[in-house]
Amino acid sequence: MTETADTAPADAATAAPTPGGEPSSRPDGRRRPKPPADIARSWLLVPGTAPDRFTPAAASRADQMVLDIEDAVDPARKPAARDDVVAWLRDGGEAWVRINDRSTDFWSDDVDALLGLPGLQGVMLAKTEAPEHVTETFDRLGGAVRVLALVESALGIEESPSIAKARGAFRLAFGSGDYRRDTGTSADDLAMAYPRSRLVVASRIGGLPGPIDGPTVGSSHPVLREQAGVAVALGLTGKLCLDVEQLPVINEVISPTPSDVAWAQDFLADFEGRGRVIRDGSDLPRLGRAQKIEKLATAFGVAPAS
């Protein structure tokens, strides 16, 4: 996917200066802080049944980690997985948690167990299909915990504008596997373009950050790179991930390119040098894009091309 400096998406591209799209540490040797969740690219799902993986995953290249006590956990093991997640968060760990959907008996126990935990960064609400699912979750968690709505069905896709406007909604994510099972849709890019675009438009309507794409299953990095690139082209700005080996590719694809960063810095320097004067109608959108690229480059540690 080749873009020019004037047309490439501001929040993504296809190359970066280092493997993983970011240096693992800063020049002073300290690890670079995780990007904030509103612009996070890679969202690593870790089964709640694997507490030995929590700490290593938290130290990985994932922008955000999600401890999963929903789809990755057998119903008989959900209480134990929930207890392990709560204990880790209570003991100083920090993560998001994917909780069970509002229609299940597990939902109430999930929100009650997570309420007030200092390490809870937010919850990913499975199978969100209505705005009240978000709002009820938000309220039960004290009205201060971010709710990332995971949309996984035809009904959820069609209700996504209302979901995005719900009180407590932080960001939308696409449960692509369950959506395909619900609708019988193939994984073909054309077939999946509508639900992805629907989430992009819904996020814009709701004033939310760009949505998060579903995971790519398999170990092929070329396939992952291609699928992530398609998602970026449609306007998605993050991607769920099931394997730490996928993180460098996701972070690279959903980042500004070094050439984009160089263009942004040059444009901003020129804009300041001429006294911030708007010369024509193209300056304002170019200014907005340059400022966005600069913000993302700083957060992701992408250096300009020389």
Image (cartoon, rainbow, N blue to C red):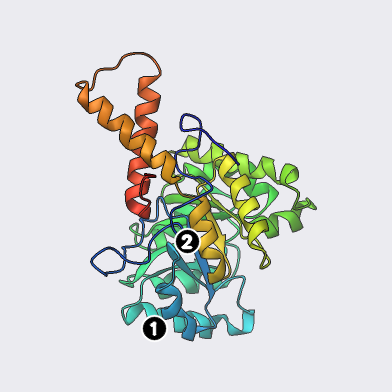
Q: As rendered, which of 39 and 304 lies closer to the eye?
A: 304
The image's mark for residue 20 is 2
Residue 81 position within the rendered picture, expressed as x and y whole percent measured from the top left: 52, 82
- Locate residue 141 relative to residue 128 in the image: left or right: left
Q: Looking at the picture, tell me which residue is in the foreground, 18 or 185.
A: 18
Residue at image position (33%, 44%) is 295
Res. 125 in view: no
User: In this rendering, is residue 215 above or below 256?
Assistant: below
Q: Nearer the viewer, residue 239 or 229?
A: 229
> Dot 1, crowdedness within 10 Å: few (<14), some or many (≥20)?
some
> Which quadrant would the N terminus be assigned to in this image?
top right
Q: Which residue is mark 1?
A: 87
- The amino acid type of the residue labelled 2 equals Gly
For residue 114, above or below residue 50:
above
Circles 1 and 2, Cβ within 8 Å, touching? The answer is: no
Q: Would residue 137 appear left or right of 160 to someone viewing this image?
A: left
Query: What residue is rendered at 45% in x and 43% in y?
Result: 11
Q: Quadrant of residue 105?
A: bottom right
Question: Which is more N-terminal, label 2 or label 1?
Answer: 2
Label 2 Cα crowd, 10 Å radius (few <14 / some 14-19 / many 20+): many
